Image (cartoon, helix red, strand yellow):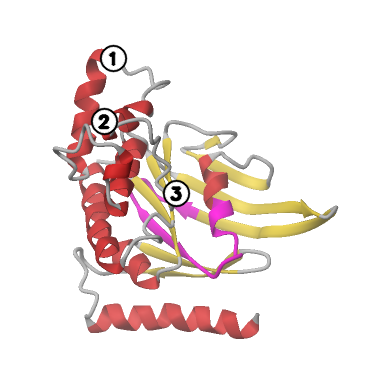
Amino acid sequence: MSRGGHIRIEHLNKQFVVDGAPLPVLRELSLEVAPGEFVAIVGASGCGKSTLLRLVAGLEREHDGTLQHDGAPITGTSLARGLVFQEHRLFPWLTVEANVRSALLNSGVPRSEQAKLVQRHIDLVGLQGFEKAWPHQLSGGMAQRVAIARALVNRPQVLLLDEPFGALDAMTRARLQQELQHIWRSEGITMILVTHDVDEALFLGDRVVVMEPRPGRIRRVLHVDLHHPRDRVSAVFTDLKQEVLAELGELAEAA
């Protein structure tokens, strides 16, 4: 069951200043994500996907428009919103167990309960037996599993994923996509994924948001009405993939 995690974005505008001149990054972007929903965002580099995710995380604060989590304005970071980057960003001087526990430092969870919580999330990502391993002893996929466990250990309502599998080989990426889907279905957490991989977006998302660049805005939202686990070679999946690729192809031609 979901425990909150409603994200509301209305008329969101964001710009940076480059060489003294304003550079619009996001323009009039509106999107609502229901509690427990999985939304995947795709688009070319430079369309503002990662900036949008950072705004929802609270890492970027300057913007115009409405940005809310469960009805409250997002004004900074929160343990209620976890974030996983493309790079695992593990502390090399800490073991797997200690890396996951590091996310609980300011959580208020009693130390007597932390060990059980950490072990539960190590088990959740399939790393039983690697609790005492160091980051340099892990494969890229295993390190990213640790990063996901660390993001989940605070039991956030929303998990934000910024190209989490982009640096991995195809087989590892497919395996971790399945793991992430299992976590989403079992934990009921709202998930927002930014990815360049259309196949990944359709395999995981309830909806796929296609963004267009300069400045970033929503071009189209596709509902993926397919049961999990999804068959990547089915006719319906293939047709949806061609739809999204066609949208992105039109954007590339217009650029």
Name the spot of residue 85 as percent of width and height, x first: 44, 49
Q: Which of the pair 130/69 is nearer the observer?
A: 130
| Residue 154 in view (yes/no) | no
Separation (CA) of disc 2 from disc 1: 14 Å
Separation (CA) of disc 1 from disc 3: 27 Å
Residue type highlighted by circle 1: Arg
Residue 35 quadrant? top left
Query: Which residue, as the protein is rendered here, is positioned at the far right?
Result: 20
Mark 3 or 2, nearer chain start: 3
| Residue 13 in view (yes/no) | yes
Q: Is residue 168 above or below residue 253?
A: above
Name the spot of residue 78 as percent of width and height, x first: 48, 32
Q: Are marks 2 and 1 in contact (CB under 8 Å)?
A: no
Separation (CA) of disc 3 from disc 2: 19 Å
Q: Is residue 29 above or below residue 158?
A: below
Numbered tag placed on residue 137 in the rendering? none
Name the spot of residue 69 as percent of width and height, x first: 49, 39
Which segment did they paint magenta?
32-52
Q: Which residue is mark 2?
A: 97
Q: Residues within 10 Å of mark 2 (few under 14, many from 20)?
A: many
Residue type highlighted by circle 2: Glu
Quarter of the image with the C terminus is bottom right
| Nearer mark to the viewer, of 2 and 1 | 2
Q: Which residue is mark 3?
A: 85
Mark 2 or 1, nearer chain start: 2
Quarter of the image with the N terminus is top left
Check if residue 44 falls in the magenta segment.
yes
Q: Is residue 91 above or below residue 176?
A: above
Q: Which residue is mark 1?
A: 111
Residue type highlighted by circle 3: Phe
Label 2 secondary element: helix
